[in-house]
Amino acid sequence: MATRHQNERLFGQWEELPSGGRRYTKQIAGRLSGFARYCEEVDSAEETTHFWQEIYDRNGRLVARHEKFPVDSGHQGV
């Protein structure tokens, strides 16, 4: 489990959630085009409740989502 400070350094962007937790995001450029966005939601104790990856094309359109935690569902086309 990462601390709040570690998550802030790793992700760089976050928003406070009404439940007292946070949603962290980090954007990574794609190898050829587009980008991926990694998203993690944590509760008020900074324990991960959801973690997923979103894949965007070069026009910024969401093309796939991959939920990794709590259950790894694999890539799902949008």
Image: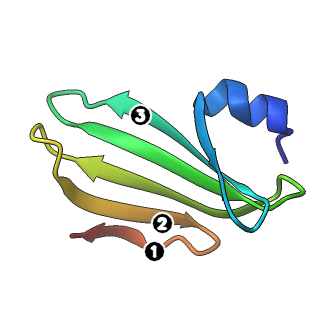
Q: Is residue 30 left or right of residue 53?
A: left
Instruction: Decide: few, some or many residues near mark 2? Use Cα within 10 Å; few <14, some 14-19, many ≥20.
Output: some
- Residue at label 3? 27
Discs 1/3, front: 3
Nearest the viewer among 8 and 68 is: 8
Q: Secondary structure at mark 1?
A: loop
Discs 1/2, front: 2
Q: Residue at x 79, y 60 (%)?
A: 20
Three-letter code for the amino acid on which mark 2 is drawn: Glu
Q: Is residue 23 left or right of residue 73?
A: right
* Contact (Cβ within 8 Å) of mark 1 with mark 2: yes
Residue 31, image x, y percentages: 23, 27
Q: Secondary structure at mark 3?
A: strand
Q: Residue furthest front?
A: 18
Three-letter code for the amino acid on which mark 3 is drawn: Gln
Nearest the viewer among 27 and 44 is: 44
Q: Is residue 55 left or right of residue 8?
A: left
